[in-house]
Image: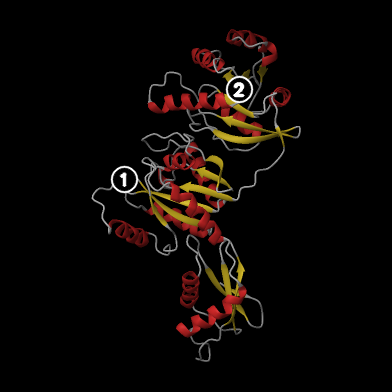
Amino acid sequence: MMKNSKIAIIGRTNVGKSTLFNKLIEKRKSIVSSESNTTRDFIEGSIIWKGSNFNVVDTGGIDIDGKNQEEAEILKQALKVAKEASLIFFIVDAKAGLMPYDEEICLKIKKINRKIILIINKVDSLRNKREIITEFSKLGFSKENTFLVSANSGMGTGELLDYAYDNISASKTKNIKHDISVSIIGKPNVGKSSLLNAIIRDERSIVADRPHTTRESVDSDFIYKNKNFLIVDTAGIRKKSNIKSTVEKISVSQSLYAIKNSDVVLFVIDVASEITSQDKKLVSIIKEYKKGLIFIINKWDLIGDKDSNTINKYKKYIENNFPGTTWAPILFVSAKENIRISKILDNVISVYENLTRVVDESLLEDILRDIIKKQRPNKNRKFKPLRLKHLRQDSIYPPVFSVLIPKKDILLDSYKNFISKELRDRFDFSGTQVFVKTRSSSKEQEED
């Protein structure tokens, strides 16, 4: 048997590929909609069946005409996935009947010389199943390789997995542990998919010169410098008032979920576009979730007549529009021209290390003394300088420090920020927020 355990789901638009994919992996990962071409990128997921692990891939809906660049790219990508698979699930629509596109797609995938089964979907309410099989027999599949299913209800999906188990080899169940999870976030058409492709050097997300080509969150697993990365290219997020279709609403929800579940966020900005209130809202969400943050200023190649002050001026522009983020690195790149792309993952590793940095406790007492000498804290309730003791690190991810103060006294936020700044000056906390809280001398109670 083949060592590859990849299963590719192939078919024309709107035959139920994404519904089948979601049913098989038991998650709503692919977006399901009555709109055509909902799945534009290919989406991967894992299936565990009888103790074995299969990798299943939902490809974009194929329009064989390929009238525009995007449709041609979807076809090219689907065939590429099919070539990499050991088993192809070729899916057709029983309710629509055999279509000319089905026959053309069938001819193309048969040339790939992979094991293929025919899946006739949407048969849950159809009684004339023998007639359905006869109609689709024109595609040349044996009865043993023809399956009637209802992806919507799950009918027949167990038989599909039994076939996969019996006909292709699969690894025993083993969960991949990701060292670092990264999400690529930004407005539509700022170059997120191009950036992902440049980072992993593979045409994984479809790139086209119009907004909303990435409709789903696309996961990519890879290894860089002996670290397992999960990087997620998300759909572009717009204002709620501009989000009309159900598909877009789900895409936005998935993008926010990606932020919440990532360690480091690459926030992509098109250098030729104005920063909007939606950009500011997104960055505030990233800060609220306490994630590592790197600003990626894309399409830097489009800026002409650059001099030594160009970068400094744009950095100031970023600082003015995103106050309280001076700790976040700003990288000026061009995904299209591959400019400074190699620096991105090194910065991600650095930010993750800073998120999880533990400062030696023996250093913190000396640091606190130096801080107090440099600037005394605010006065206490008796109008005397507030006594601060025992600076310690309470947690990581992000780093949180606390200092001991007398009961009923209050340390001003401005001085907490001063301590945070001093810690930054002494240790590398680039890319992460650093929080300073207080605890009571008589009771270990935090004051926010």
Q: CA distance from mark 1 to mark 2?
A: 41 Å
Badge 2 is on which residue? 88
Q: Are marks 1 and 2 in contact (CB under 8 Å)?
A: no
- Answer yes or no: is residue 16 visible: no
Q: Quadrant of residue 160?
A: top right
Residue lying farthest left?
305
Kindly identify the residue that appears in the image at 47 percent across and 43 percent down: 199
Up the image or down, 347 lies above or below 428; here it is above
Q: 281 or 427, which lies in front? A: 427
Q: 113 or 419, which lies in front? A: 113
Badge 1 is on which residue? 301
Residue 346 is left or right of residue 9, and the answer is left
Disc 1 residue type (three-letter): Asp
- Answer yes or no: is residue 374 visible: yes
Disc 2 residue type (three-letter): Ile
Secondary structure at badge 1 equals helix
